[in-house]
Image (cartoon, rainbow, N blue to C red):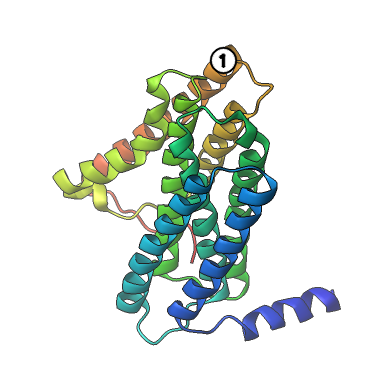
Amino acid sequence: MAHATALIQSMRATAGGRPITSILSIAALTALLGGVLAHHANWPQQHVVAGWLAYAVLGGVVAIAAGARLGRAPFGVANQVTLLRAGLVCLIGGALLASGQAPIMSWSLAGLIATALGLDALDGWLARRLRLVSAFGARFDVEVDALLLLILAVLVWQADRVGVWVLAIGLLRYGFVLAGRLAPRLRAPLPPSRRRKVIAAQQGVTLLLCLLPPVTGRMASAAAAAALLCLTLSFVVDVLRLAQPRTALTGGLPKRA
């Protein structure tokens, strides 16, 4: 218990800092990891460079958004973990250039994806534990999750494991956002939901399994179909709830900081 308390206090002490400092630090880590993948995991250089460029763009967006939403508030260690996940997602996105034709990347790519998925649980825990929950952090977390699912869905499709319909797993959330633009009622905040969190995690794990070399196309299609069905039903439940007249939707942030 004493060690855990000391660890939490240490994290709280380093939770401050400006967004640009965190962005540059994660940029260095992303560059280092990309170099390792290129030299030791045989990733084509253009895929690694594409990941670096994607992070440069994303880092700029995060810097602008954090400046506007956080003001003088510290960026926070939880957001730093989310930013690290974003760097991994950018490297994973670089694999899209392989168009499903780079089997030599499969296991290293799977490891990268598994790490990004695992860190998704850490940033929320840190935010709650260190009392760093914020609207910016919640939105940042959700957007990184959505981008990762979209990239994974495209990778599964490119690998010819599943038909083009698998892209719906990555596009449903963006469709929901677009629907909210057309129907303001759908933009109302939803209360926290364990069902929503479990199904969101299921999507990432399922798409990861679909990319593993031993998994056959038939197995991948069955798993992806089950995941898409669960995701679709989850969105239907939320849409029906939001569409109810004079519904009081109370609760905290959608995920965390």
- Decide if residue 242 is on the left or right side of residue 252: left
Residue 129 versus residue 85 in the image, above or below: below
* Total numbered badges shown on the rendered structure: 1
Residue 63 versus residue 237 in the image, above or below: below
Measured as percent of width and height from the top left, residue 113 is found at: 59, 44
Mark 1 lies on residue: 217
Residue situated furthest left in the rendering: 182
Measured as percent of width and height from the top left, residue 152 is found at: 49, 37
Which residue is found at the position 56% from the left and 61% from the top? 30
> Between 217 and 145, which is closer to the camera in this rendering?
217
Callout 1 secondary element:
helix
- Decide if residue 124 is on the left or right side of residue 229: right
Which residue is found at the position 66% from the left and 50% from the top? 39
- Decide if residue 32 is on the left or right side of residue 179: right
Instruction: Say which quadrant the N terminus sits in.
Output: bottom right
Image quadrant assignment for residue 124: bottom right
Residue situated furthest right in the rendering: 2
The reply to whether residue 110 is visible in this rendering is yes
Measured as percent of width and height from the top left, residue 41 is found at: 67, 44
Measured as percent of width and height from the top left, residue 116 is found at: 59, 51
Which residue is found at the position 54% from the left and 43% from the top? 44
The reply to whether residue 254 is visible in this rendering is no
The kind of residue tagged 1 is Gly
Residue 191 versus residue 128 in the image, above or below: above
Within-10-Å neighbours for mark 1: few <14, some 14–19, many 20+: some
